[in-house]
């Protein structure tokens, strides 16, 4: 496929994806196919991701633990920066342990922050999902991110 044909094809697919119906968090957990997903805060796309796992979608991991999904980790970082009144560095797997052992936060405080983020994800965000085959999912995700430039994607 030539470049212009690829762009036209991906543009058409992106249009279909964006025109799909909104889903709430509970509806996204029922998705069992490969595809790309769009996460909205209000009317704005804030994150685009992909799942190439049939039978288990990446969206189930979104509102679990900060180590399970990038967007969850980014929201926790924002909230920690507000709570600690400092520009908080990107979170790593060992961040929670370090914060607790250094006495910066208690286990209970971290659990409360995580619960607040998970609640926000489940109740305040909206989602769209576009099913596509596993061969196209990466290309579609990259194209959508490049075109829509969501603030929470790196």
Image (cartoon, helix red, strand yellow):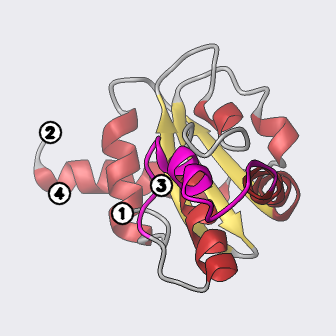
| Residue 27 placement: quadrant | top right
Q: Name the secondary structure under disc 3.
A: helix
Which sits in the foreground, 101 or 109? 101
Magenta segment boundaries in residue numbering: 89-108
Question: Where does label 2 land, which residue?
Answer: 1
- Asked if residue 93 is among those painted magenta in the image, a careful observer would answer yes
Give coordinates of residue 21: x percent, y percent.
77, 52
The mark lying in front, picked from 1 and 2, is: 1
Residue at (47, 81) in percent of width and height: 87
Which residue lies most toward the top here?
55
Location of residue 64 with respect to 45 vertically, above or below: above
Q: Name the secondary structure under disc 2.
A: loop
Would you say 18 lies left or right of 121 here? Answer: left
Which of the numbered marks, if any, corresponds to residue 14?
3
Which sits in the foreground, 15 or 108? 108
Location of residue 68 with respect to 30 vertically, above or below: below
Location of residue 145 with respect to 62 vertically, above or below: below
Which of the two labelled residues, at mark 2 and mark 3, occupies the earlier sequence position?
2
- Asked if residue 150 is among those painted magenta in the image, a careful observer would answer no
Give coordinates of residue 49: x percent, y percent.
49, 47
The mark lying in front, picked from 2 and 3, is: 3
Question: Where does label 4 land, which residue?
Answer: 4
Which sits in the foreground, 69 or 35? 69
Which of the two labelled residues, at mark 1 and mark 4, occupies the earlier sequence position?
4
Q: Residues within 10 Å of mark 3 (few under 14, many from 20)?
A: many
Q: Residues within 10 Å of mark 2 (few under 14, many from 20)?
A: few
Question: Where does label 1 land, which residue?
Answer: 154
Residue at (40, 35) in percent of width and height: 137
Q: Residues within 10 Å of mark 1 (few under 14, many from 20)?
A: few
Q: Residues within 10 Å of mark 4 (few under 14, many from 20)?
A: few
Task: Kindly report the distance in space between the C-alpha atoms of the residues bearing marks 1 and 3.
Answer: 19 Å
């Amino acid at each position: 496929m030539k470049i212009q044909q690829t762009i036209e094809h991906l543009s058409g697919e992106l249009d279909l994806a964006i025109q799909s119906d909104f889903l709430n968090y509970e509806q996204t957990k029922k998705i069992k196919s490969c595809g790309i997903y769009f996460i909205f805060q209000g009317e704005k796309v804030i994150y685009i991701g992909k799942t190439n796992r049939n039978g288990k979608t990446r969206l189930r991991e979104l509102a679990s633990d900060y180590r399970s999904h990038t967007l969850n980790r980014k929201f926790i970082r924002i909230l920690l920066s507000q709570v600690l009144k400092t520009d908080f560095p990107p979170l790593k797997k060992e961040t929670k342990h370090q914060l607790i052992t250094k006495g910066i936060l208690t286990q209970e405080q971290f659990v409360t922050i995580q619960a607040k983020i998970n609640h926000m994800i489940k109740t305040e965000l909206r989602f769209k999902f576009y099913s596509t085959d596993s061969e196209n999912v990466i290309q579609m995700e990259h194209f959508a991110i490049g075109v829509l430039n969501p603030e929470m994607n790196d």
